[in-house]
Structures are given as structure tokens and as C-alpha cells.
Image: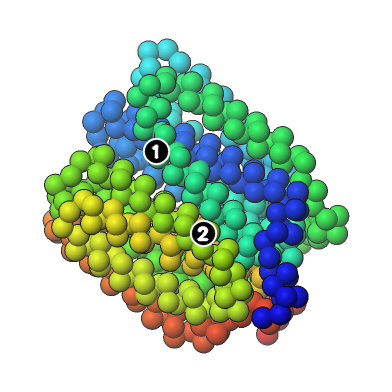
Amino acid sequence: MSSVQDSAISPVPMLRNRHFLFLWFVNLTTTLAIELFTVTILVAIFKQTDSTLQAAGTMVFRTLPAFLLGPIAGVSVDRFPRKNVIITMDLIRLVLIGIAIRFLQGDGKVPVAGIYLILAGLSAADVFHRPARLALIPSLVSQKQLVSANSFILVSCQIAMAISYTVGGWLILTVPLHHIALGVAVLFITSILTALLINVPKLQEKEDGSEKESFRYSLISGWNYLRLHPIARPLTVMETVEHLPHGIWTGALMLAFTAKALQGDASDWGYQVTGYFTGMIIGSLGALAISDWLNRYPGRIIVVNACATGLLTLAFASSQTVWMAVAWAFVFGPPNAVRDVAQDSLLQGTVEEGQLGRVYATREMLRNAMFMFAGIFFAWLSDFVPIRMIYVAGGVIYMMTGFYALGNKALRESKMDNFIRPIENKNGVKP
């Protein structure tokens, strides 16, 4: 490959782009804030109630808003300036954290119902915030830099989540919960101030903010666009189906696997989660190293990694010791990270910018609905079926999604370097 091509995909110019770096920092601080608050609340509720079901309620109230608000969020992200959406949602979350601080003062007891509602509100804001962040990336970097940009953002997200799970459990034992909430509020304030510094190209802001079509037409055109798009449709179908086996990786199921299959405890579960996040961080950095391949063969990489996920899940199900499970959890991380980068880059590189918010929000809605159902279903099933068999079933479903991707020619043979975004017609996409 020529030096010209190498420089085109080098991450260095991207890292000199201060407005992308502002967006990256917003992504980092908001991810850390949400995950830290959720982890500490989950542990606090479990300690207070000694109820796995009530602790699992945090997952339900975090997931439900994405299912209910996805279509509205997608249209809003495409109709209004995305920078403004990001700032507004963080302001709402700051207010909600302020309410939580007031709730958590006093005798130290967690008002479970009230905290559930606050978690739902934080998640509802994220339904708008996350698609706006992702849809803003192509406005700040060139298409050649999308893989590097997504890799850079993903690695920071995984570091933030690893910190949240590692530090959160320790903080809740040593620091009052309302003090942790104060720290979360500071993170949201930092995110808001940073987002104000982002300078989105004026032409793009005009395109994003000047849509005058009706809400109903915007909603219908978004569904039509997704239904007819040769890349976004199979990716959305694949990811939605994958969130069925993703349900086996909820905290409750992994704790059950650790206790029943490995005779371990909560600390052993923590080692597995840390191993997975470490693998995701390494995989995200690896995606930067192979950004050229990801640009040329994203579809093939998605297919291979989907099948690898199935095989690794089967290997995890066969673990006989905690440390075998930790090792497999670590190995599970890199292919997942590389595939996440490939999928986000494909969407950002092939979907019309005026439709990108709707595509992302619809994807989030379907994925979260499936994940919420799967988490509850598999938790119920674990009372009747050996826990190892649930993980074997998850591995088989992952393999099926890999075969689905392999059978879709447009996805399998997609190449970002040669892809030209289609021009929308009145039905949502160019035939």
C-alpha cells in the first residue's frame, strides 16, 4: 500500500482534530458517569434488599426507555442540531442526578422505586444522547478516518466501563452513595462544558437542523430507509438477533454460572468481567492497528467475528474452573471490539447523514428490547435448565447469526473504500 494511502487512514490527523477530541471526551465522561452510577446503585440495592430480582430491576429500567422512545429519538436527532441534543440531554441528566442526591441523603437507605425512575430517566436521555454522539462522528472526521475514530472512542468506553465495575464496587463500600452521586454530577457538568466547545461544520448543522418534514413522514421515511438499505438492514437484523444470546451475559446469569457451574462467588464473577473489558480494550487498540483491513473488508470481518463469538461462547460454557472462565472471557473481548468498530464504521460510512440518527435509534430500540426480553427469559429458564446448557444455546444462536451474515452478499462483500452513499428519494432511499 502506498504512503499516500497510509497517511489517509493514519489516526494521527484525527487526533489533531480538537473538535473530534471534544466529542471523544464527552463520550468518555458520560459513559463513566452513567456506568459508575448504575454499578454503585445495583450493588447498593442488592446489599440493602438481598434480592437478585430487585437488583436486576436496574437492567430493566435502563433498557425499557430505548424500546419506548427509539423512534422519537431517531427523528429528533435527525431534525435538530446534534450538538444541541447532546447538551440538552446532559442537562436533563444533571437535574436527575441532583434529584438522586436529595433522595440518597439521610439514613443511607436507597429508595428503590424512586431510584428505578431516575435510572429510567437517565436511560431515556441516553436514547437521544448516544445516537446524536455516533451520528456526529462523520461530521467531524473524514470517511477514511471513521474506523480510527470509532476504535478510539470504543477503547475509551471500555476503559470507562472497566473503571466503573472495578472502582464502583470498592467505592460503595467506602464512600456514601450521595457523595458518589455528587461525583457523577461533576462528570456531567464537565461533559456539558466540553460539548459547548465542539464546532460542527455550519453546512452540516444546517442540514441536520433545517428538516421541515412532518414528524410522521420523518418516522415513516426512516423505517423505509432502513428496510431498503442493503447494509443497514442486514446489520440491524443481525445485531437484534445477537442480543438474544447477549442476554446470557447479564450480571445475574453470569453470577449464576459462576456459582452453579464453577463453585465461585461474586469476586470470581468480577474477575471474569474485568477479563472481558481488558480484552475489549486490547481489541479496540487492535482495530486501530488493522484499520486498513477494516476499511477494505468490514463485511468479512463481521462474518468471521460473529462465528468466532459463537465458538468462544461454547468454549466458555465448557469452563471447569474460574480461571478458565476468566481466560475465555478475556479472549472473547478482542473479536467483539473489532466487530463493533466495523459495524459502526459501516453504518456511518454508508448511511445518509440525514437518516443516520434514525438508523442508530431504531437499532438501539430493537437491540434493547431483545436484550431486556432475553435477560428476563434466561434468568427464568436457569431455574429449570442446567446453566451450562443456557450458554451452549447462546453459542449456537451466535453461530446462526454468523451464517446469516455469510449468506448476505451485500454485507459479506461490503467495502467502505468503494462505497458511495445513496441519495434519498421520497421513499427514503435510492433504488
Residue holding disc 2: 284
What x and y, as percent, mark residue 304? 42, 77
- The image quadrant of residue 213 is bottom right
Rendered-image quadrant of the N terminus: bottom right
Question: Under tag 1, what secondary structure?
Answer: helix
Amino acid type at mark 1:
Thr
- Residue closest to the far front: 3
- Between 182 and 115, the one nearer to me in the picture: 182
* Amino acid beneath label 2: Ser
Q: Is residue 353 visible?
A: no
- Give the residue drawn at x 39%, y 77%: 402
**Rendered residue at 24%/34% (across/down):** 51
Q: Position of residue 224 (x, y in %)?
A: 62, 73
Left or right of 255 in this view: 232: right
Q: Please state the horizontal and vertical placement of residue 285, each as a whole percent of the image.
A: 53, 59
Q: Residues within 10 Å of mark 2 (few under 14, many from 20)?
A: many
Residue 214 falls in which quadrant of the image?
bottom right
